[in-house]
Amino acid sequence: MMTVDAVIAGGGPGGLSAARVLAARGASVVVLESNAEIGSPTRTTGGTFIQDAVELGIPPHLYHPVRGGRMHSANRSVSRSYDPPFACILNVRGVFQFLAERAIDAGAQMRMSTTATDVLEENGKIVGVRVKDVRGVDYDILARLTFDATGYRATLSKRAGLHDGFERFGVGAEYDMYAPHYDESETVGIVGSAFAPAGYAWTAPYGNHRVRVGVGIIHGDSKENPRDYLDKFVERAGDFKINLRGAQPVEYHHGLIPSDGMAKKFVMDGMLALGDAAGQPSALLGEGIRWAIRSGILAGEVAADALAANDVSEAFLARYERQWRKTYGKNLRIAALINKRIAAWDDAQWDEGIELLDQLSARQFGQALASNFVSSWTLWALAANPKLLRKSLGLARAMLTPSP
């Protein structure tokens, strides 16, 4: 048995960010990572936005800027260029290990190949976790605060009764390819029934002739397996002027991300959920790294305040949930609503959707992809484009109409 101020189940970007904040403020912190290596196996493409990377302190050598993007439906396409670049693709393993190094520098302890299997409860309050280590030995860690950063499984949240978990997931299958002739300045997205029913296919370069080529499908809306479409997409990439000549995979990735939207609750007495375990990714594109880091920072600050005040009650920890919902809630709710509607679109509807995107300027297009909807750009875009306004109102009505 060991005793600490905070135990964090999950060595992903959210858990590591919370660990750094807590340790820097003097708390004793242990991070439990079930895998043998931080950031491995890779389960995400790592697409994000340069402004977020800069704000979150990610070094430039760990992300690859892209200067343009294209989206294709069955019969339409839209492309935009950015100077300076707007989006980037992360070196996922490198970023995760950088976050781990920052947490270690702050004083956090790391336990690899160690899994939190259950919560410890006392009088309705979470007081730590039961773990299994690399040798298969079970033991308890007592903690004043417990963090669920276990990702889409939300293992501890479900065990503790904080929330019921998720039913709808973005499921992705992806090759990390050495592609000597790919244009590393752009990303490409493909929508429609041919390559990604209830989802989309993508290419995402991250430098040094490496490009991630994948397919994601929403399970809960479709039973199709993205792996069944991945090789077809690679073989037909030339149809979209994607140059994979001479390319070969050097890694295969598979991952899930919750797409139900935010969990109903993030906190209870003695416990906080963050990142994917709290349903905090943007469901629009299925990207969660930047959201997890921000969640970890916010949760870590509130948790450090709670420890200092010797008050780890739900009432105190709810400051984290209130601030998250106030700052990011509207954008994430809109992203989830849009995702649930467009996942059901047929090819004709996708053609119309691409036409709608084509009405946006490069900046507006980028803001939409970044799930930044509650912003002045939306009003300017709608006011300047009557066609866009009509289509957007139609989409809004569809989103507000209950599904059959």
Image (spheres, helix red, strand yellow):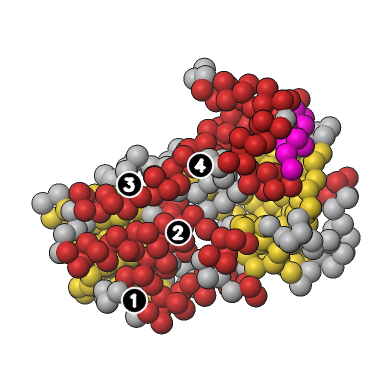
What residue sits right under mark 4 in the picture? 331
The amino acid beneath tag 1 is Ala
Mark 3 vs mark 4, CA separation in Å: 15 Å
Q: Which residue is mark 3?
A: 322
**Side (left or right) of 145 relative to 69:** left
Q: Amino acid at mark 4?
A: Asn
At which x and y percent is residue 223?
59, 35
Farthest left residue? 123
Which residue: 79% across, 69% down?
A: 209
The answer to whether 224 is drawn above or below residue 312 in the figure is above
Q: Earlier in the sequence, mark 3 or mark 2?
A: 2
- Residue at 27 percent of width and 66 percent of height: 304
Q: Which residue is mark 1?
A: 24
Q: Left or right: where does residue 17 sit relative to residue 204?
A: left
Magenta range is 351-361
Camera-nearest residue between 67 and 226: 67
| Residue 282 locus on image (x, y percent) | 53, 46
Which residue carries the number 2 mark? Answer: 294
Name which of mark 3 and mark 4 comes first in the sequence.
3
Left or right placement of residue 261 versus residue 83 in this view: left
